[in-house]
Image (cartoon, rainbow, N blue to C red):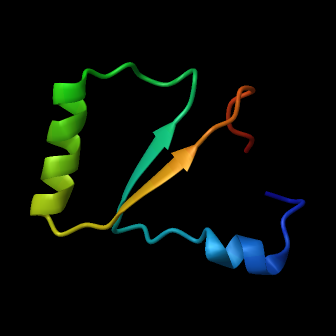
């Protein structure tokens, strides 16, 4: 994130209380049913859900 502008960094600031789902080619495979259970659990806990999508080379640190 070092080459992002301060405004961009602010726009992607994540709340640690929220459910953060990271999608990356090297991540864990999950069935649709398992994924829906993760989403339903977060919804039941009244958490906001944020998705972080990795590119073809994965996520940088």
Q: In the current view of this chain or complex, which residue is farthest to the front?
A: 32
Residue 3, how many percent across, how many down?
Answer: 90, 60
The picture quadrant where one finds residue 2 is: bottom right
Residue 4, how many percent across, how many down?
Answer: 84, 65
Q: In the current view of this chain or complex, which residue is farthest to the left?
A: 44
Q: In the current view of this chain or complex, which residue is farthest to the right?
A: 3
The picture quadrant where one finds residue 53 is: top right
Residue 27, how many percent across, how many down?
Answer: 49, 25
Please name whichever residue, 6 or 32, is drawn nearer the observer in this view of the structure.
Answer: 32
| Residue name at image x 54 percent, y 49 percent | 52
The picture quadrant where one finds residue 25 is: top right
Left or right, residue 48 beside residue 2 = left
| Residue name at image x 71 percent, y 26 percent | 56
Quadrant occupied by the C terminus? top right
| Residue name at image x 44 percent, y 72 percent | 15
> What is the total number of numbered labels drawn onto the structure image?
0
Would you place residue 33 above or below residue 37 in this image? above
Residue 36, how many percent across, how many down?
Answer: 19, 38
Would you place residue 22 above or below residue 16 in this image? above
Left or right, residue 10 beside residue 32 = right
Quadrant occupied by the N terminus? bottom right
Would you place residue 39 above or below residue 50 in this image? above
Left or right, residue 21 beside residue 48 = right
| Residue name at image x 75 percent, y 27 percent | 57
């Amino acid at each position: 994130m070092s080459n992002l502008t301060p405004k961009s960094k602010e726009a992607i600031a994540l709340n640690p209380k929220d459910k953060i789902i990271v999608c990356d080619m090297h991540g864990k495979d999950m069935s649709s049913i398992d994924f829906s259970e993760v989403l339903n659990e977060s919804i039941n806990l009244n958490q906001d859900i944020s998705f972080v999508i990795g590119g073809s080379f994965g996520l940088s640190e």
